[in-house]
Amino acid sequence: EPEVTQTPSHQVTQMGQEVILRCVPISNHLYFYWYRQILGQKVEFLVSFYNNEISEKSEIFDDQFSVERPDGSNFTLKIRSTKLEDSAMYFCASNGDSNQPQHFGDGTRLSIL
Amino acid sequence: GDSVTQMEGPVTLSEEACLTINCTYTATGYPSLFWYVQYPGEGLQLLLKATKADDKGSNKGFEATYRKETTSFHLEKGSVQVSDSAVYFCALSDENFGNEKLTFGTGTRLTIIP
């Protein structure tokens, strides 16, 4: 069964550095999402992306965050200048047509030191 | 705005016990409802879903019925197994699957002991 894949599985970064989290959605999917889960808290929506543009973003998704689909397969989340509170598990998800639920990757654990 | 409230955990049960994890929701439209499961060290996997009132989602012995009158989507299983140990998330999507964000509950950690 096709899967959403995320790399790396764990990223450790110094505060203030830029970080890029990578995702390869399922190949025929059209809608892409990022969520995050701070340790012990709920999974929170960050951003959705369709047709090469952001379709919705949450209050969390401020100017430090950006997303990009640089080619036909990757979907990236960039955090420009990381803060301690950005430490979390970041999940990528994708879905195809309107009858399909979202499929999630295994997540990237981001640790900011 | 939309919200999901689910039973606080952790929940510990013996093998073959009955399970109920409560979930209620608040939504402005006509949401689709989901249960996702997160096994240790893995991502979120869709367990079951329901798209309209009175629909029952089922998978792997788990069931949940979309109750519009009580705005609930409780997860049930008649006889749990050790392999069911995981974190369970109730979630909603407010319109359709196509391009709507998921709103999650806080998750309920379930541990089944032999």
Image: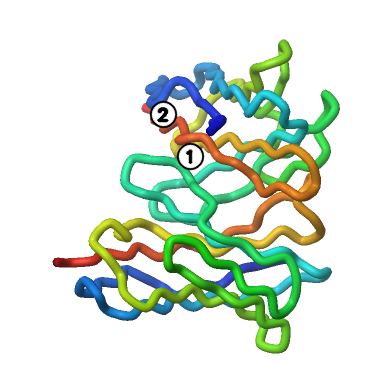
Q: Please state which amino acid type lies under the numbered disc 1.
A: Glu
Which of these two is toward me, A112 or B109? B109
Q: Where is residue B80 shown, x and y percent of the image?
A: 30, 70
- Residue B17 is labelled as none
A95 vs B21, left or right, is right
Q: Do the residues under discs 2 and 1 have CB atoms within 8 angstroms?
A: yes
Q: Chain of mark 1?
A: A
The quadrant in which residue B71 appears is bottom right
Look at 66% across and 87% down and name the residue there.
B70
- Whether residue B105 is visible: no
Question: Disc 2 designates what residue?
Answer: A112
- Locate residue B12 relative to residue B62 in the image: left or right: left
Helix, strand or loop at mark 1? helix
x and y percent of residue B67 in the render? Answer: 66, 82
Residue at image location 54% in from the left, 61% down from the top: B35
Is residue B81 something one can see in this rendering?
yes
Extreme residue in the left direction: B114
Q: Residue at x 54, y 22 (%)?
A: A21
Q: CA distance from mark 2 to mark 1?
A: 8 Å
Q: Residues within 10 Å of mark 2 (few under 14, many from 20)?
A: some
Q: Which mark is residue A85?
A: 1
Ranked by sequence position, the earlier of labels 2 and 1 is: 1
Seen at 54% across and 66% down, the residue is: B58
